[in-house]
Amino acid sequence: MLDQHSPEGPRTPGTATRGETVPTVPPPASTAADAVDVTALLERGRTLATPVLRAAVDRLAPPMDTVAAYHFGWIDAAGNPAAGDGGKAVRPALAVLSAEVTGAAPEVGVPGAVAVELVHNFSLLHDDLMDGDEQRRHRDTVWKVHGPAQAILVGDALFALGNEVLLELGTVEAGRATRRLTAATRALIDGQAQDISYEHRDRVSVEECLEMEGNKTGALLACASSIGAVLGGADDRTADALERYGYHLGLAFQAVDDLLGIWGDPESTGKQTWSDLRQRKKSLPVVAALAAGGPASERLGEILAADAKSSDFAAFSEEEFAARAALIEEAGGREWTADEARRQHTVAIEALHAVDMPDRVRDAFTALADFVVVRKR
Amino acid sequence: MLDQHSPEGPRTPGTATRGETVPTVPPPASTAADAVDVTALLERGRTLATPVLRAAVDRLAPPMDTVAAYHFGWIDAAGNPAAGDGGKAVRPALAVLSAEVTGAAPEVGVPGAVAVELVHNFSLLHDDLMDGDEQRRHRDTVWKVHGPAQAILVGDALFALGNEVLLELGTVEAGRATRRLTAATRALIDGQAQDISYEHRDRVSVEECLEMEGNKTGALLACASSIGAVLGGADDRTADALERYGYHLGLAFQAVDDLLGIWGDPESTGKQTWSDLRQRKKSLPVVAALAAGGPASERLGEILAADAKSSDFAAFSEEEFAARAALIEEAGGREWTADEARRQHTVAIEALHAVDMPDRVRDAFTALADFVVVRKR
């Protein structure tokens, strides 16, 4: 279990540059975690959680069961079975792994994995509607296909179902797990409120952006990383340390995501080129570039302020977005964000120090963190 | 504790007729419950719950705290303090009363009262948006004033807060209470799904209407009537019986509400004349009239079928709605619904038989049931 980068260590720039297809953030040096089969870890989480998740969703009254099945990618808009891109399934992998911290079987973490997935998908349904996002994972979003009322209603139902799946265990541990899940859900909602309010502001500080991303991404990954342990009877100190791991892993993940949102390859991300710039998102590279000072930073500030008032924004060419991306990079926003991903990765790994667990489990947590940070575009 | 009307007893028509200002449903014969000061019971629930509710809402991050305060009527749209019509506060009164079933102090029920109010208001925020309702209690609804995104977000936040208020008690009883609250919340959501789907159907059976109303109104009143007892350590049998009381009380309440939705005095209800007819709601008097058979029932069916296709519906005169209301009454829909309110009231009171509790508490439950069913228009 190793962390090559201390949080206070040198902040070396990300080595990747625009147009490359190599990972944006350089991988950590090789470690024992390299021997871990991450694909198998992800597959285990998916295999254990998916049948329980589907059974939970099947409890919903029609037509909510169908709408939810569409959202999860199990059926298409016409109601026919679909292959379903369930995503990377990092959260279920973490939840079942965290049960093993206490010596429990991975299965003990399954209700936690399912509850976290239900809450995550509740937030996707509502956020897509609030943000007016029409596509998710290359498919029309639920509110586009089934209307806003179903997006609200099925989101609510998944939220309730998440609590139900835990509370019906009827144990003291389930009550503690639900309390932590509720705290994470409140953070998710706070993060979405911050995200919406930041859209209407000219400037957002780096600290505000990190707080928002911690709420939107960190809190639920923190819950996923600890909920299996809580269900397995871990004490609060252990659960808190695992939450710290997950929280900072979430921030590392989000920093990488913010890099991909500007410089990602549309083929891999499934989004348009310069996606976050098109949406005028105040993501980490942007706020870091604006906070950096210097000529490129100032020029970027002027351009973005003009963009905010521009009615021609929607008709901007590839070149105009490319020019903005180049300024962000010149001001240091790209490098800072790549560094930030590594700093958060380091803090995540360090949090594991505080927890006594089998080496095999520790290596698996480390390998999952490496996977999240160096994932391909 | 008495029930004058057995469920199988004679189904006497409601004595009230259109245009009267007397109660729609005749009051039960005088009983020991008449000596109970219902106003004081309601005031006690309000006084105990409101400060805790306000403290919980104050935890929300800006601007959600402000939006929620507007929804609860504590401030106006401009942000100035408002008197706040908090409604009748039957649910908080029931929740604190139910704590006394176990011999606990009414204060023991307060977190339950607050949690139920939070979940109730979550559902109002989302339902108003889904249904496009622009007014609630003589004020613009949240989505009209603060936009759809805030209505979704603050609804989500109140839902989460409801669980949080219970779970932070950290007791086994709180876990059990949260599980019951979650089941009630799922029923609320199911009821709203049914309500939406019924709008698109020509015919709804009386049974379907009762099931929908049981989900939308009965389930949460059931939870309110038992949650204090659960927090006070009541066993499941006691809690289940109290839930039955609250569930049937909710159905009685809804039957009265459906009568008021057609024949209520706009001055008291705060709604337009023939409110539910204008919204083409398939409420109990309508579905009962359609199910009754006979000339008036058939004529009503033809007219409503034509209305459903009519593009002039919005411009209908008072007289046209009055004619529909008269047909519903002639077909027996009004009388059946008034009887149904009394039948549900009777079943609610009977459910109390199964629970051992102080006479004073039993009389108070009975008095609250009488109040709900014979409330003035």
Image (cartoon, coloured by chain):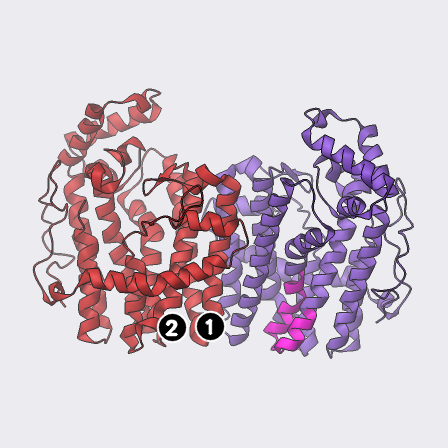
Chain colours: A red, B purple
State the image quarter where residue B278 is shown. top right
Amino acid on which disc 1 is placed: Leu
Q: Secondary structure at mark 2?
A: helix
Q: Quadrant of the C terminus of chain A?
A: top left
State the CA–CA distance, disc 1 to disc 2: 10 Å
Question: What chain is tagged by disc 2?
Answer: A
- Asked if labels 2 and 1 touch by Cβ distance under 8 angstroms, the answer is yes
Asked if badge 1 and badge 2 are on a common chain, one would say yes
Would you say A1 lies left or right of B208 here? left
Q: Quadrant of the N terminus of chain A?
A: bottom left
Mark 1 neighbour class, 10 Å CA radius: few under 14, some 14 to 19, many 20 or more: some
**Residue under label 1:** A169
Determine the residue positioned at 27% across, 39% down.
A270
Disc on the earlier residue, 1 or 2: 1
Secondary structure mostly seen in magenta is helix
**Residue under label 2:** A231
Determine the residue positioned at 49% across, 70% down.
A168
- Where residue B304 is drawn, which disc sits there? none
Would you say B50 lies left or right of A191 here? right
Residue span colored magenta = B221-242
- Residue A252 magenta-highlighted: no
